[in-house]
Image (cartoon, rainbow, N blue to C red):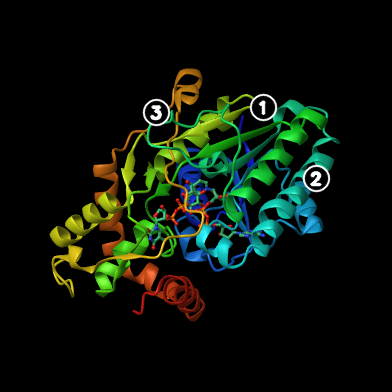
Amino acid sequence: MSRRLLVTGGAGFIGANFVHHWCRVYPNDRVVVLDALTYAGNLPNLKLVQEQENFRFVLGNIGDASLVNKILVEENIDTIAHFAAESHVDRSILAPGDFVQTNVVGTFTLLESFRQYWETKANPDNYLFLHISTDEVYGSLCPNDPAFSETTAYAPNSPYSASKAGSDHLVRAYYHTYKLPTIITNCSNNYGAFQFPEKLIPLMCINILMGKPLPVYGDGKNVRDWLYVNDNCRALDVIIHQGKPGENYNIGGNNEVENISLVKTLCQIMDELAPDLPVRPSEKLITFVKDRPGHDRRYAINAHKLKTELGWSPSVTITEGLRITVQWYLKNHHWWKPLLSEEYQDYYRQNYRDSRGVFQ
Ligand code: NAD
Ligand code: DAU
């Protein structure tokens, strides 16, 4: 059966990688992207697929119910892959309102539109609302705690993760109350091509190339469980085809690393691959700065359910994935340079100079 997908947030990092994956593997499916092109949305991310006949881009907000209704009917959508969100924890600390608006109210509006549309259908089992969430909803782990599983209680600690938790609860409630076929995925930190410069890995790569300080929050010993974005896209593919409505699936890379060790590895790869760095060795740029308020200490994902029930496991090790990613940022100056806009510089000053005392 060919599918007709609505991908929200498809011009962002994971959404764009997912669209590339889907258009490559399922060229006969219809893929419609709905994206508001916030600071994090970037049309060039979709350049590879833009000319394909089965692809359409719609500029708009998930909170615009009449637009969403129009797309659902016009395109006869059967599957929503919902990526659109405000996604950066530091921005949620500076300005939490947008996170509640997009992540909670926006998701509610989208769910409600999809429910009303789906209720008119004769074959309701052929529909799916896939909600892309995060491991951050589970809160923070101590060093010896077991990794997050699908039954770990929610304990979000930032406005970002609280707003994602709120949206997860709404999605869950729509399944239980209306039997709307929904699935929630909770994945760990993604990395790879097309990630916006504000996130740890691209930020460090770009700052090394520019000879700027590498701001490591707190003692640098916070742990993240890194997932190569293409592996996440493969997991989402399997879940769309074989996942069970009403379920949650955790997706993780099995790659727990302390931030300071990750940053040092990036410095080593850069020193090796980039011929004319302004500062060498680039580790000299590492600067410990004031911690992120409420900074979660450790995330770790137990992806056993996805492996045993649907046969997925990650295919890229952190060593391979970081190399590929550094090479991508080295080759794609033309992609990231325009993103260091005036708006980005304002955010950078607020987050790094005003909140953390970094003056470059
Ligand atoms: P991103 O910030 O790179 O992209 C978000 C996209 O959503 C952008 O294209 C933006 O324009 C769009 N958008 C924002 N508000 C919108 C609105 N109201 N209407 C329509 N479009 C809107 O995010 P990402 O890193 O690709 O994350 C995608 C999803 O995955 C998010 O839901 C995020 O919470 C989740 N997630 C991300 C990670 C990660 O490591 N990046 C990990 C776990 C979960
Ligand atoms: O775990 C999944 C989450 O991963 C997603 O839900 C979020 O959308 C995504 O942004 C990401 O959140 P994090 O806060 O973990 O990612 P970030 O890249 O912002 O930071 C990763 C770690 O690096 C975190 O411990 C904070 C630290 N850090 C980050 C930045 C930007 C630094 O030490 N310095 C920095 O400049």
Which residue is at a point 22% across and 55% down the rendered structure image? Answer: 264
Q: Name the residue under label 2.
A: 112
Q: Would residue 50 be visible to someone looking at this image?
A: no
Instruction: Name which of mark 2 and mark 3 comes first in the sequence.
Output: 2
- In this rendered view, identify the residue nearer to me: 176 or 144: 144
Which quadrant of the frame does ligand 2 lie within? Answer: bottom left
Q: Quadrant of residue 268?
A: bottom left
**Quarter of the image that includes the N terminus:** top right
Reply above or below: 339 against 155.
Answer: below
Mark 1 vs mark 2: which is more N-terminal? 2
SS for dot 1: loop
In the figure, is residue 160 to the left or right of 320? right
Q: Pinpoint residue 19: horizontal percent, then vertical percent.
A: 51, 48
Q: Can residue 61 be seen in this view?
A: yes
**Point 70% across, 56% down: residue:** 62
Please say if the residues under marks 3 and 1 sit with CB atoms less than 8 Å apart: no
Instruction: Answer left or right for 125 relative to 300.
Output: right
For label 3, the residue is 313
Q: Mark 1 points at which residue?
A: 245
